[in-house]
Amino acid sequence: MSLQYAIEKQVALAAVRRACALTSAVFNKLVKQETLTKDDKSPVTVADYSAQAVVNTILGHAFPTDPIVGEEDANDLRREEADKLRNRIVELANEALTADLGIGDIAEWGIGPGQERTLEELLDAIDRGNDQGGRVGRRWTLDPIDGTKGFLRGGQYAVCLALIVDGDVKLGIIGCPNLPVKSEEPEGQKGCIFAAVKGQGVEQMTISGANPTPIVIPPVAPGMLNLLESVEAAHADLSFNGRVSELLGITRPPTQMDSQAKYGCLVRGDGGVYLRMPTKAGYREKIWDHASGSLLVQEAGGVITNSLGQPLDFGLGRTLGANYGIVAAGRDVHALVLAAVQKARAEELEKAKA
Ligand SMILES: Nc1ncnc2c1ncn2[C@@H]1O[C@H](COP(=O)(O)O)[C@@H](O)[C@H]1OP(=O)(O)O
Ligand SMILES: [Mg+2]
Ligand SMILES: [Mg+2]
Ligand SMILES: [Mg+2]
């Protein structure tokens, strides 16, 4: 008997691998070679759209009735003045879709040599990502590039794809083209994929899908605990993290990293805690920013909650609803971290009153 979600996992891995190849190609062709000003977002835009086109094309072919909650939509691309951008997207998406078959790939999923798509097909594929999410039914959620700032810096970013059934994450893939395969060899081979299936654990493999290896969160040696956090101060309250570290007696500096690559690092024991508290009232975390990561944590033997200790709810729509932050850690440390978070929060409220 085959394992549950075995086909979904293979298809999702094929899609994420091709999207990772595409984003790496965009970085090498556009970001490295073109002189970029800080707020020129064009290579990111090209990569976001084309990666979503690739993943949604493959999902649409393999699972034609599954809705997709994707970050991007093609509205801007359909404008007349976007013709240069459209041409680039067609070229890049087709290059990724028609590349030779790799490990586990099957041509019936619409991939491999000769399977070019037209502009209209690719725009429609991007727009397949318009599902609004919800409590009932089966749907995918996609972040074609998570950590766009990291992508532009040549740092960490991730292609994140998850399958959600009735609000419950069943399958989560995180492709990290720039993450060292071994954390102890930061200059060694780069590019990993993490794949988790509910009830079946987590695997790390190379970016081509080779060498899948089960991983669990290792127990943290005393004094070795540290925080994984955003690079961007606008995305997480980093000074709050500092206070939590202090309360926990953590002496190691935090590891700052863009994207859901942080979840991959957490599950393989690089840093024992991922803490993300809101910086401004009103921002709602998106389901595609945490669906894959949350399953990785749980399947690797960890715990993920908000700062009130409640589970994240992926059945509310495109967002996780009211934002009480995210606390993820190994099972043995999560309760300690949560207590420190709540103490730091109480201190903040006291200070605000005074
Ligand atoms: N104010 C905010 N608070 C938390 N996350 C944010 C905020 N603004 C953007 N993001 C999202 O944070 C994610 C990256 O987080 P990290 O800093 O951990 O890499 C991105 O998905 C980004 O969304 P977007 O893709 O819309 O820019
Ligand atoms: Mg994101
Ligand atoms: Mg994104
Ligand atoms: Mg974005």
Image (cartoon, grey):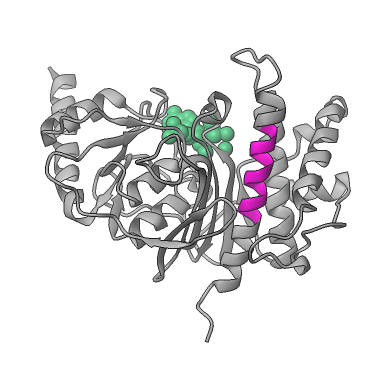
**Ligand 3 positioned in quadrant:** top right
Residue at the image position 83 percent from the left and 57 percent from the top: 113
Report x, y in % for residue 262: 39, 41
Magenta-colored stretch includes residue 16: yes
Does residue 127 appear anywhere in the picture? no
Q: Position of residue 70 (x, y in %)?
A: 62, 47
Magenta-colored span: 15-26
Q: Is residue 131 left or right of residue 236?
A: right
Please, is residue 86 above or below residue 215 in the view? above
The residue that appears at 84% across and 51% down in the rendered structure is: 121
Who's the residue at 86% across and 51% down the image? 117
18 or 46, which lies in front?
18
| Residue 263, position as x, y percentages in the image | 39, 46
Where does residue 342 sit, x and y in percent of width and height? 17, 39
Identified at 21% across, 49% down, the residue is 334
The secondary structure that most of the magenta stretch takes on is helix
For the C terminus, the quadrant is: top left
